Amino acid sequence: MDLSYGVEYEAFREEVRAFIAENWSRRDARDPQRVTAFRLRATAAGYLYRNIPRRFGGSEQPADVLRAQVIHEEFSAVRAPMEIAGNGVRMLVPTLLECGASWQQEKFIPPTVRGEVDWAQGYSEPGSGSDLASVRTRGELVGDEWIVNGQKIWTSRAQLCRYMFALVRTEPDAPKHQGISYLLLDLHQPGVTVRPLKQITGQSTFNEVFFDDVRTPADWIVGRRGEGWQVSRATLKHERTGIGNAETYLEQFAKLVNVARSTARNGRPAIEDPIVRDRLAEIEGYLQAHRYSTFRQLSMNLAGRNPGPVTTMNKLVVTNLGHLIAALAQELIGDASLLLPVYEPGRKVGNERWMNQFFGSLGIAIAGGTSNIQRNIIGERGLGLPRDRTGDAS
Amino acid sequence: MNFDLSEEQSALQDSVGRLLRNELEQTRLLEIFDSEDGHDVRLWRALGKLGVLGLMIDEKHGGTGLKMLDAAVVTEILGYHGTPGPYLGHVAAALAISLGGNDAQKERWLPRLADGDCVGTVALAESGDAWQPDEWALPGQAALNGAKRNVLYPGQADLMVVGVAGGGLVLVENPAQSVEVTPLPSLDATRRIAHVTFRDTPAVPLGGSAGRLRDALLVLLAADAFGGARRCIDMAVDYALTREQFGQVIGAFQGLKHQLANVAADVEPARGLYWYAAHAYDAVPDDAERMAALAKAHIAERFLHAARETTQAHGGIAYTWEFPLHVWLKRAVFDRAYMGSTSVHRARVADLSGWAQAG
């Protein structure tokens, strides 16, 4: 058992550090041009977009989980820009690389990687949440164009996105899963209406998107007609591996300990209260278990071995962690929980900022496959229990 | 990074698992559970022959010379199979002699402990659930007078390591001649306990650190608990795949499926936690004490939760003596209480984390 990354990777870490020291300072973060220039240099050096071919603007590096981890650690430590966030880089690009036609890869991947265009995810509909394959937005091929009508929901940042990748029912007579196609849509056209949804936090980060005779070229389809479900699995796979990062929760836990230091219980700092200490230690048990569990999974992946059922559990595990943290944070911040965090110039936001974590922990339980769907997946794929006869858990 | 077991460690787990599947099928386990002394000499000898009893004893003294991580991964398998007998106290006693015995003591005892020819135990707790070294009050003199509680298999033991006031350890050889044993009705009949009373009992001081011995026991309890929790889940999944109600196997019902999924997600990540606690014991001194306490508190709690949930998941059959799930339910209670309960170790984690200092 060896928890160090080894000589080769520590040498690589030095190389990454030297690169960052030479090319990045925190002041650059305020200047979008410098951020873009840094990303280009970091990509040329092989640190960003590692699994994307050079001809599409990536750095085309051999898969190496540990190098990726070292890069992540060193970049995050000084908040140097990593890959552009959003569904384009995280979901569409891997999908196109796996299933896209070469002209689609050439047309869409480079501007997405450069951050010039972003993508909305058009999966969920008002009647299709966990049962995603029941989508009803329909596409009809008329001449050399698809005509799309219907509605998507929970569409993050749609008002800022140029394009959408969407699941659309194109074969209404085929069985549920075989009637869907994966279409690419230009959102900048008549017939597209984006309506922001106000969330429980009071903010609006996702939307409803309505399609009224929206058009897209016949060849803006990824995979063949009726294969959209399988194509979207490639994307969801990428989304699910993105959740389960122990580092995020280690940081959140450190902040929770700080809250316990700065708040009072019975006239003393809360951190001295035996009940608070017990609950912190309980949370840390779950946290460290998940941390070493991810180390184990990473090591086994590196060795080409299957870590087993635990891989189906990561999302539920971090969701539960978030709930435990939220519960104790509420207790610690006390009356600050009576306030909605409002971010405006001149207003100081105090401990009520933890209400964002409180709401966010509920969001994590819903987004990307609800916790009950996760329990189906754990039960069926992890433990080998029979599939629900009505369900499409996977 | 290689946070994974070596091939040798996996092979060791496999060979111990094979032995226990053969020697300890469920009817045999229940026979030992119901037996007079809860100690099956044949099984004990077989474990000794396989090297399980001397894993951390150095090769010069007849052991395998391995580390805590090796002992912990084996202990997980013993826990999985609900292995009855004096193993835990025995391994701890051997460790205490390895850490603090003089050459003569090592030569006299370690080879016989390694092959199971003799049985060792540790006497630590005093009244008031006083398991921790700084709570011990028994005066550590050449003639011991006083009592220890909840000692594993003192009646079978050939030597007893005793914790004394000030956090020291002393060795009592051949305790049958000098220690009075008061048997107790052990809830977990796979780990029999008794109170012991010393009356001018001859004892010799051991070197080494009682804190280190405590940490070792905490790691082993965490490993045992992980194995036990895993067994509870496996038994419940097996049952859910065979028991039919309303025309289908009950594992197809979402209520049960979700219950078992919750338990599995609660338990499974903890494997890495006990591995790391064992690794820290071997190689990361600054982290060893805190992680041993954290692993024991967390995993013993997970085991008890898993045992309770899976008992309910089985329905009435699991409430009977003849269905063996209660063996693990009772082992879970033991793992939680032995060496101090969850809240005790969580409080220690808090103290050792330095949370109260400005951060």
Image: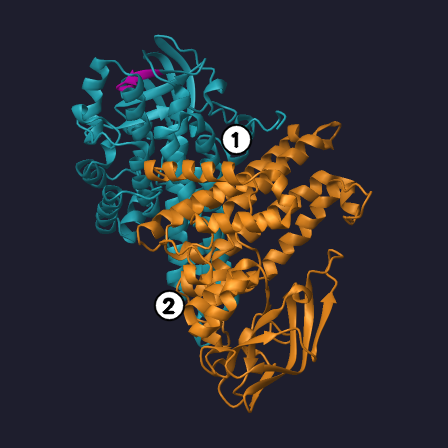
Q: What span is in magenta?
A: B170-175
Q: Is residue A8 left or right of residue A316?
A: left
Task: Give the chain letter at badge 1.
Answer: B
**Relative to A101, does residue A381 appear above or below in the rendering?**
above
Out of A355 and B302, give the one closest to the viewer. A355
Give left or right: position of A138 versus B87: right
Amino acid type at image mark 1: Val
Residue at the outermost right position? A346
- Label 1 belongs to which residue? B349
Confirm whether the magenta stretch covers residue A50.
Answer: no
Colour of chain A, in one word, is orange
Query: Which labelled disc corresponds to residue B242?
Result: 2
Of callouts 1 and 2, which one flags the residue occurring earlier in the amino acid sequence? 2
* B265 lies above or below A30: below
On whether disc 1 and disc 2 are found on a single subunit, the reply is yes
User: Badge 2 sits on which subunit?
Assistant: B
Amino acid, disc 2: Thr
Secondary structure under tag 2 reads helix
Image coordinates of residue B131 in percent, x first then y, are 46, 25
Identified at 37% across, 36% down, the residue is A11
